[in-house]
Image (cartoon, rainbow, N blue to C red):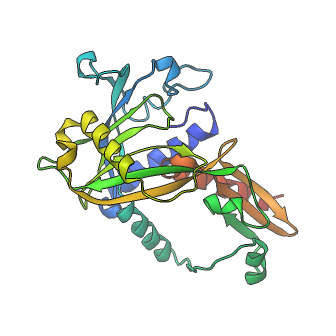
Amino acid sequence: MATDNGVQEEWDAVSFKKFEKISQQSPECGVRRMDIRAIFDSPIENAGIVSQGTGKIWYEKLVGGLCEVPKHELPQGSNFGYDLSTFMINVQSYLPWLQVQVLKAGIDLRRSQYDDINGLFDNFPTANTFLNCTGLGSYSLKGVEDHNVYPTKGQILLVETPSKPLEKMYFRSPKRVASDTTYVFPRYPHGGVVLGGCRLDGVWDGNVDLDFAEDIKRRCCALCPDLGKPEDLKVLYHAVGLRPSRKGGPRIEAQFYGDKMVVHNYGAAGAGYQASWGMAKHAVDLIVQNSRL
């Protein structure tokens, strides 16, 4: 969760409430309520989980409360932890579900490639409002070329579900945002467990590091012994992703190109899903506000 005591916390809150609604109304959407155990190695005042200016964990009420992990259950070297209820998002189910909702709403989906934002204006001359959600593409997209954008490399592997399925997610990190974060996310409804990970800022290399994958397995099995031994894990596949980070944080703002309005919405880094609905609402609000000017 964000800790800016401002708009980013609001994005997360809006998204959390939306996930709560769709998980109840559409169980097939790939979003499911699930507990998580979050462990931090730093003292709470240095862990980056309290809101700026308030010193409080703002989302305690939103998630239904926090339960402190007993000291005897903390892994060696850790400082504190909380058990809380959040959401697991299986993106292989969630993204197709979103696409179906878009099509049901009568929206026309087209796939094209552009290296210049002005090409959109040429191809859709009657449109006056555009949304730029190109993520890392905004670094090189002509007409935008935002060099505050940079990649944050992440690496995960998917392993088979253990004989006794995991009932919660696990997370361990020196602090909220760190390069060597460890996480164990059971994936429903299609099975498997996602193991990660890392946050490597400024790394454009999209190749899998198999030696690092072994390190991920060791860390995850130490965090969640129910996974079994690292050497016994059955790996289904490895994956690397480049998160769209941005110096100064996400960019959501309106920019006019002549009579064309572009609302930029990118730079969420690793918070893209958790902030998605809130960021979308913010972008739409900007469209409405500017259309009244």
Q: Position of residue 89 (x, y in %)?
A: 37, 53
Rendered view: 92 above or below 271: below
Which residue is nearer to you in this view: 211 or 170?
A: 211
Position of 162 with respect to 189 (left or right) is left
Q: Is residue 99 visible?
A: yes
Quadrant including the C terminus: bottom right
Which residue is nearer to you in this view: 70 or 199?
A: 199
**Residue at left offset 48%, top offset 52%:** 273
**Residue at left offset 79%, top offset 74%:** 118
Q: How many marks?
A: 0
Q: Position of residue 258 (x, y in %)?
A: 88, 68
**Residue at left offset 35%, top offset 64%:** 93
Q: Is residue 184 visible?
A: no
Position of 270 with respect to 114 (left or right) is left
Position of 146 with respect to 41 (left or right) is right
Q: Position of residue 24 (x, y in %)?
A: 33, 53
Rendered view: 105 above or below 239: below
Q: Residue furthest front?
A: 211
Q: Residue furthest left?
A: 163
| Quarter of image, res 53 | top right
Q: Position of residue 88 (x, y in %)?
A: 35, 49
Which residue is nearer to you in this view: 99 or 167?
A: 167
| Quarter of image, res 238 | bottom left
Which residue is nearer to you in this view: 99 or 247?
A: 247
